[in-house]
Amino acid sequence: RLFVGNVHIVGPHHKLLDLMNSWKAPNQSTIMGMGPVHASKAKRKGLRMDHLFNDRADARRRLEADLFDYHGTLKNLGITEKELYEKSKDNPKVQKHVLDFILAEDKAEYTLTLYD
């Protein structure tokens, strides 16, 4: 029997939050999403590995709650997803699935599909 414990997943939105947190100097960020995923964990909003295996509806609900930080940061910085995409696509540290996340209409579904 395999037990999956308290393993939080770094999603594309965490990597983008990392980038947005260093918006004025994007090359200073590792864009790995470590700080934002730890913040999600501390707020008890983050998506854990066991959520993927147990209840997809609960995983989606948690992920949608976690995405409030992503949308709030965009709003606080006064930038659009188009501007985020333009800045991100020129950064070699940003992976394709993260760029695709920006363009996705249903960000929760896109993210959950990454882990299927």
Image (spheres, helix red, strand yellow):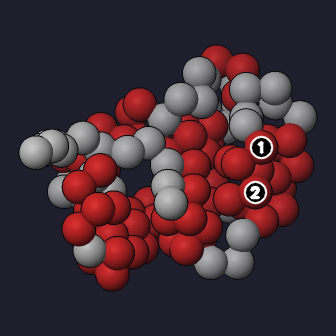
Q: Quadrant of residue 91?
A: top right
Residue at x 39%, y 33% (from the top left corner): 35
Front in this rendered view, residue 20 or 11: 11
- Left/right placement of residue 25 relative to residue 114 reads right
Q: Secondary structure at mark 1?
A: helix
Front in this rendered view, residue 8 or 21: 8
Q: Are marks 1 and 2 in contact (CB under 8 Å)?
A: yes
Q: Residues within 10 Å of mark 2 (few under 14, many from 20)?
A: some
Locate residue 116, reporting x and y percent. 50, 60
- Residue highlighted by disc 2: 100
Q: Secondary structure at mark 2?
A: helix
Residue at x 73%, y 37% (from the top left corner): 95
Residue at x 10%, y 45% (from the top left corner): 1
- Residue highlighted by disc 1: 96
Q: Looking at the picture, which amino acid does disc 1 mark?
A: Lys
- Left/right placement of residue 43 relative to residue 36 reads left
